[in-house]
Amino acid sequence: MAVKVRFCRLLFFVRAVTWATLLTVAVFVASPAQAQKSTAEHLEEPGWWPRKASQSAEEYAGTRACWSCHKEITAEQENTPMARTLLRAEDSGVLRSHRQLKFQSGNFLYRMGIKGGKPELSVTDGRDTITALLQWAFGTGEVGQSYLFQRKGIYFESRVSYFGSLENLSVTPLKVFRPLYDLKDAMARPVQMDEIKRCFSCHSTGSAIGGRFEPDKVATGIGCEACHGPGGEHVNVMQASVIQEGAGGEHAPVVIFNPGKLRPADSVDFCGACHGTWPDTVRAGLNGLFSIRQQPYRLQNSKCWGKSQGDARITCVACHDPHGALVQEPSFYDAKCLNCHVATPGVKPAGDHPGAWCPVGMRDCVSCHMPKIEIPVMHRAFADHQIRIVRPGQPLPN
């Protein structure tokens, strides 16, 4: 909905997992990634992992606490789609910049916008009308944005979402498999707490405290501590060290998690906690078009990955800076490809460059080998991370 997710690369993954899990539980098949752990298994291990709950809200220092030592990188990260992938609905630029959004689906007319200073959704069937005040907006709106509201302690997801390519509302993905029964059903679907926890754990920082969902304590969007873990102790140690040893605190113990030190396979799993690991995607029964947004899964299905699982040159962070915005220009990734592929005709692949020379060209590699695939329900095309030679008429690999 905020890829880049990224409308929510994250939220639609959660939806897809929920839908697919109800239909089937996939049986694992042989794969180079079979030895990889699921996110649930990683969460049971000691130490930090994305989506992990902390024991106390006091463990978090907040992103602003990172500024004093990491000003440039913190400032850059705060402007990324990941940092803005969850908003309180009243802060949604999408809703504030559109006077009123309208969408007709069958007998139901949807209207969404700011009314009386409040973000409101209304649905009418021509006879009756019901309304709801929106509470949460998932996604920046560049790809899309979806909405939650609450009634009597139950969370509901709007049946319509905003899509950037349409500049309007359309049906929320994966919610068109049955007829809508009545006006209430047409407005929204109830969302179980387990799904709510998953959504917020990938779109916010510090939403789960001691295993409980704490919406009042949520830091909207993905901040530093979503990936590096709660930083309260780290900040205290560094401040104390500076006082004792002077500026720099060179001898202070670094009590913060650094994902950059993970081995390559675990690094991909780390990102996959929200973007779709190989085990998580297979267990959810997602394949083909439904798996395009599961970038780690698609990457690990690549021939490149099968040959070099221990190679740091083929991880998510080898191509994407987690502290910066997604680079859209295809030529940017050419150097990444040529880190592994031979660039000279006639030169045989070797240990330092295991990838063969491409006879077609050395520019815009991803345009051919990671083609963009249109996902109709998302009203957008996304890069397929299953790196391969694409031939005309060839079916989309699973």
Image (cartoon, rainbow, N blue to C red):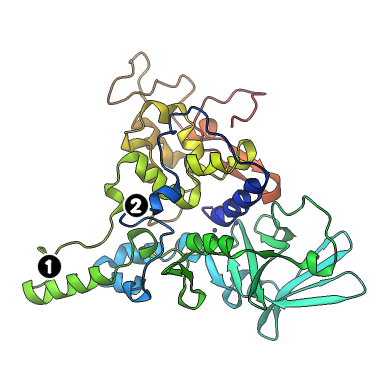
Residue at screen point 45% across, 76% down: 217
Residue 143 place in picture, x, y as percent: 60, 56
Residue position marked by numbered label 2 in the rendering = 45
Residue at screen point 73% across, 62% down: 159
Residue 121 place in picture, x, y as percent: 73, 73
Disc count in the image?
Answer: 2
Q: Nearer the viewer, mark 2 or mark 1?
A: 2
Whether the residues at callouts 2 and 1 have beta carbons within 8 Å, the answer is no
Q: Identify the element where label 2 is drawn.
A: loop
Bin the neighbour count of mark 2 within 10 Å (Cα to Cα): few under 14, some 14-19, many 20 and up: few
Residue 324 place in picture, x, y as percent: 40, 56
Q: Is residue 82 left or right of residue 186?
A: left
| Image quadrant occupied by the C terminus | top right
Bin the neighbour count of mark 1 within 10 Å (Cα to Cα): few under 14, some 14-19, many 20 and up: some
* Sequence-first tag of 2 and 1: 2
Name the foreground residue: 391 vs 346: 391
Q: Is residue 126 left or right of residue 307?
A: right
Amino acid type at mark 1:
Gly
| Image quadrant occupied by the N terminus | bottom right
Amino acid type at mark 2:
Glu
Residue position marked by numbered label 1 in the rendering = 249
Residue 260 place in picture, x, y as percent: 29, 49
Task: Please identify the quarter of the rendering in which residue 235 is found.
Answer: bottom left
Q: Is residue 366 left or right of residue 269?
A: right
Q: Is residue 139 visible?
A: no
Residue at screen point 29% across, 69% down: 66
Task: Please identify the quarter of the rendering in which residue 46 is found.
Answer: bottom left
Residue 120 drawn above or below residue 289: below
Q: Identify the element where label 1 is drawn.
A: loop
